Image (cartoon, rainbow, N blue to C red):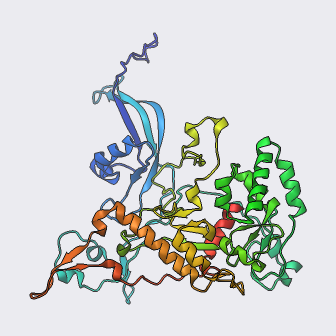
């Protein structure tokens, strides 16, 4: 209850326990029903309110499926909804009688503060300049006959959205000193380069191509200084010793293999690797770290350290389709926030030895080590990602080892595509791994692998359809060309 003072212009009102939600509608409301339809009705409004991570969608053309919504943000509020009535007799000169009533407490308010997205109408421009609506031709409003689907309709493919953000962003563009008019250095460049004066990241790694004549024997001086300056904890010294032992035992390692064998913070790993090894950009050892002074191109025993770019094949004959693939993609174009969701700060998830998250462990017991499946393949297991870069020595399958060892002792030339292996070795290995993965998936899904009976004409017996007899679809993977995207991804992860 709100107590009043002795001032005659104050009043005493009783508070109510009724809680309300306020929507600051960005328009002049003439019809309440039309206003509710634009926000999806009471059902959609209730569903949005129940999920605090969602924003309220408002469509000014609610019957148009191509209308992009305006999104309202959710805020906590401490407001009151008052009903004020002012009554005065007509022709009376006396004061009006005012009554007030508190209808409820507003604890949540939706405010539309963002900009509306571009709108795209389903229309077609005729040769005479007139515009024709396509809504009746592209929207199926009722069951139609075959003639409806045979009609010739202009191509209409609107984008799902134009802008991912509905708030203005200042990019702070600055002029590029290398591209300024009259700059002599830019005039001497024969190639069109984008941002050539970008600041180098201070990791000081040495990158080597397959066709380079020599390989580095020691790290850059800046890499030494950088590691010594940042290795101040005893765990960093221990990680350096373990890393040296790794490269003594095996001269070439992938980044995931290192992370699965050495417990070190990812940022410290970026400084330690350039201190102990150089990075191969192309060839059969691309995206791998090689010990300083070791040249795999002149050592046939480096064959087992070559990289195999393997990508899980998808298709119903493999036991799974695109949508029900048992292994999810590491990166996806769908993993971004739309304007209809609230942006929340991302949390860094580290891998621990037992697979638990840091939130369930004490800060002093955090581990940054990956599981063995991040770089090793064995029979009966599924890769953690759809695309994997395996080293041949980490393929722990006897049949695969036999194919790799077919020319042991007879290696003559190191090829940029096949390395020290025989031609088409990588293709054979991919076929074997794909077959093993198919067996694992079908074992988990018996219905998809059971033989299907199909009817035949009279006089013939029922036969089982064997999908395995179908010819494998052509999968060409060129180590030095077809995997540039993965190589760039590895470099981005490193940088």
Q: Nearer the viewer, residue 102 or 404?
A: 404
Q: Is residue 46 above or below residue 324?
A: above
Expressed as whole percent of the image width and height from the top left, the position of residue 388 reads 56, 67
Q: Nearer the viewer, residue 143 or 63?
A: 143
Q: Is residue 133 above or below residue 292?
A: below
Q: Nearer the viewer, residue 166 or 217?
A: 217
Quadrant (top left, top right, bottom left, bottom right) of the N terminus: top left
Residue sitting at 56 percent across and 78 percent down?
403
Q: Nearer the viewer, residue 264 or 230?
A: 264
* Residue furthest out toward the front: 409
Observer able to see residue 86: yes
Expressed as whole percent of the image width and height from the top left, the position of residue 452 reads 23, 74
Observer able to see residue 331: no
In the image, taking residue 245 as reference, residue 7 lies left or right, namely left
Residue sitting at 89 percent across and 55 percent down?
225
Q: Is residue 284 above or below residue 39?
A: below
Residue sitting at 77 percent across and 56 percent down?
245
Expressed as whole percent of the image width and height from the top left, the position of residue 27 reads 41, 51
Quadrant (top left, top right, bottom left, bottom right) of the C terminus: bottom right
Q: Is residue 148 above or below residue 383?
A: below
């Amino acid at each position: 209850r709100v107590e009043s003072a002795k001032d005659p212009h104050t009043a005493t009102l009783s508070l109510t326990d009724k809680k309300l939600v306020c929507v600051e509608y960005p328009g002049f409301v003439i019809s309440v029903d039309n206003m509710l339809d634009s926000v999806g009705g009471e059902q959609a409004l209730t569903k949005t309110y129940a999920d605090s991570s969602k924003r309220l969608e408002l469509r000014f053309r609610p019957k148009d499926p191509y209308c992009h919504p305006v999104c309202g943000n959710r805020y906590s509020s401490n407001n009151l909804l008052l009903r004020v009535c002012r009554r005065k007799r007509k022709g009376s000169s006396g004061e009006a009688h005012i009554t007030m009533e508190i209808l409820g407490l507003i604890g949540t308010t939706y405010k539309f503060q963002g900009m509306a997205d571009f709108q795209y109408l389903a229309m077609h421009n005729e040769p005479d300049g007139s515009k024709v609506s396509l809504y009746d031709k592209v929207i199926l409003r009722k069951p139609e006959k075959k003639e409806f689907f045979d009609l010739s309709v202009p191509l209409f493919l609107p984008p799902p959205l134009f802008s991912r953000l509905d708030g203005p962003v200042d990019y702070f563009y600055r002029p590029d000193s290398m591209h300024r008019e009259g700059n002599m250095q830019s005039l001497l460049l024969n190639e069109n380069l984008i941002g050539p004066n970008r600041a180098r990241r201070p990791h000081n790694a040495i990158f080597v191509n397959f066709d380079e004549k020599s390989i580095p024997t020691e790290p850059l001086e800046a890499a030494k200084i950088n590691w010594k300056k940042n290795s101040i904890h005893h765990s960093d010294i221990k990680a350096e010793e373990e890393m040296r032992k790794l490269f003594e035992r095996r001269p070439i390692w992938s980044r995931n293999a290192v992370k699965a064998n050495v417990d070190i913070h990812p940022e410290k790993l970026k400084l330690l690797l350039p201190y102990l090894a150089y990075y191969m950009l192309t060839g059969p050892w691309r995206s791998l770290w090689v010990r300083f002074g070791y040249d795999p191109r002149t050592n046939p025993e480096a064959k087992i350290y070559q990289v195999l770019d393997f990508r899980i094949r998808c298709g119903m004959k493999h036991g799974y389709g695109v949508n029900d693939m048992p292994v999810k993609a590491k990166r996806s174009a769908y993993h971004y926030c739309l304007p209809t969701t609230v942006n929340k700060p991302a949390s860094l998830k580290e891998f621990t030895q037992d697979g638990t998250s840091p939130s369930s462990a004490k800060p002093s017991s955090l581990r940054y080590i990956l599981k063995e499946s991040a770089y090793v393949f064995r029979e009966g297991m599924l890769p953690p990602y759809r695309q994997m870069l395996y080293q041949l020595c980490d393929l722990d399958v006897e049949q695969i080892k036999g194919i790799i060892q077919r020319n042991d002792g007879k290696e003559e030339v190191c090829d940029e595509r096949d390395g020290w292996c025989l031609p088409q070795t990588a293709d054979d290995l991919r076929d074997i791994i794909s077959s093993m993965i198919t067996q694992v998936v079908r074992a988990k899904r018996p219905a998809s692998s059971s033989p299907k009976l199909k009817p035949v004409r009279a006089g013939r017996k029922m036969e089982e359809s064997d999908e395995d007899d179908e010819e494998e679809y052509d999968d060409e993977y060129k180590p030095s060309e077809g995997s540039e995207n993965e190589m760039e991804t590895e470099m981005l992860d490193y940088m």
